[in-house]
Image (tube, rainbow, N blue to C red):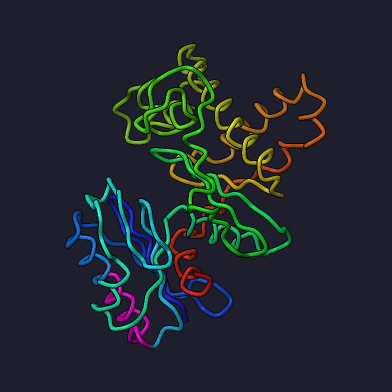
């Protein structure tokens, strides 16, 4: 059995997976913010899964943690996890000391990429996991292993400028994240609906002209993100996940249509068959938590 913990800004998910990577037990609990809060949350998650499985943490073959922010996978140190109220935390060492066994730590999107690759069941050599949430980021998996790049920023396409438009918190202008993220949609389509992206798509389906314009720009921008990933890394598949992917098939159909529209004027793009290389992450698999469990093995 392997233990995986996905620490999110509001919820933390923990799973126990068997030798084949199938989820045997899982639970969710609220995330407490700040250095001590995150450590307490992780400890509570470990205790919860110990009670569910009847196993002590030391009995698991591996323990992995996925967490937002900049992560040094060698040391387990986390920095700039803004949504968690964590600026600089030696997470790996502190959790190891607290639960009495070694843990591996990885950025949450990269962990989710590994989980998504596993959920595909094999069959492809390379995959990019495109996470559409408050921001935009991607993780790359080649031959079943994470590809982090020379400085760990492989897949950070959210901060590639694609237009001379809104200023990004990173200091550039017109980054992908300013068009293809939840924060971008909130700026362009303010609403009190608890499911803002679904509300946008519903309004567009109903013929609302403003919603149609916002949705078109969003889908075109996500298609651009897919195009960037394929043309820079030439992955077999791009799997879309993250909170915005909960729109479901309507997102996939729209992104594929946008890719086909872009390819209609470019024989080169048409030759890459981009729309056939995009999928949605399986909705019944907690890929970030499963990926964290696998990080404990592959880290």
Can residue 210 be seen by looking at this rendering? yes
Quarter of the image for residue 182 reads: top left
Q: Position of residue 65 (x, y in %)?
A: 38, 66
Q: Position of residue 160 (x, y in %)?
A: 51, 32
Residue lying farthest to the front in this orientation: 150
From the viewer's perspective, is residue 209 above or below residue 56?
Answer: above
Magenta stretch: includes residue 287: no
Q: Position of residue 240 (x, y in %)?
A: 56, 44
Can residue 205 be seen by looking at this rendering? no
From the viewer's perspective, is residue 157 above or below residue 105?
Answer: above
State left or right for residue 135 relative to residue 127.
left
From the viewer's perspective, is residue 276 above or below residue 218?
Answer: below
Q: Position of residue 117 (x, y in %)?
A: 60, 59
Quarter of the image for residue 8 reads: bottom left
From the image, give the main secondary structure of the stretch colored magenta: helix
Q: Which residues are magenta?
A: 45-58
State left or right for residue 263 relative to residue 1.
right
Please tell me which residue lies in front, 20 or 272. 272
Q: Residue at 60%, 47% (x, y): give it.
A: 239
Residue lying farthest to the top in this orientation: 209
Q: Residue at 56%, 54% (x, y): give it.
A: 282
């Amino acid at each position: 059995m392997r233990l995986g913990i996905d620490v999110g800004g509001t919820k933390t998910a923990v799973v126990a997976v068997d030798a084949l990577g199938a989820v045997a037990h899982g639970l969710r609990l609220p995330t407490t913010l700040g250095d001590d809060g995150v450590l307490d949350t992780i400890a509570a998650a470990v205790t919860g899964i110990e009670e569910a499985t009847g196993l002590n943490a030391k009995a698991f073959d591996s323990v992995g943690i996925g967490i937002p922010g900049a992560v040094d996978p060698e040391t387990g140190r986390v920095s700039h996890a803004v949504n968690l109220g964590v600026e600089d935390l030696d997470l790996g060492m502190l959790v190891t000391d607290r639960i009495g066994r070694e843990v591996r730590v990885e950025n949450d999107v990269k962990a989710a990429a590994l989980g998504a690759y596993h959920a595909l069941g094999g069959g492809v050599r390379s995959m990019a996991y495109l996470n559409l949430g408050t921001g935009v980021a991607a993780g790359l998996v080649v031959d079943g292993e994470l590809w982090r790049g020379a400085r760990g920023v492989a897949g950070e396409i959210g901060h590639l400028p694609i237009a001379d438009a809104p200023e990004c918190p990173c200091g550039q202008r017109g980054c992908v994240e300013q068009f293809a993220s939840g924060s971008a949609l909130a700026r362009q389509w303010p609403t009190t609906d608890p499911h803002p992206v679904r509300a946008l798509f519903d309004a567009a389906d109903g013929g609302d002209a403003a919603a149609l314009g916002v949705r078109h720009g969003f889908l075109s921008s996500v298609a651009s993100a897919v195009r960037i990933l394929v043309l820079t890394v030439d992955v077999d598949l791009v799997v879309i996940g993250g909170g915005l992917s909960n729109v479901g098939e309507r997102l996939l159909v729209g992104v594929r249509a946008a890719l086909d529209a872009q390819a209609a004027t470019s024989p080169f793009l048409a030759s890459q068959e981009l729309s056939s290389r995009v999928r949605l992450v399986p909705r019944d698999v907690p890929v970030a938590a499963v990926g964290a469990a696998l990080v404990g093995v592959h880290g």
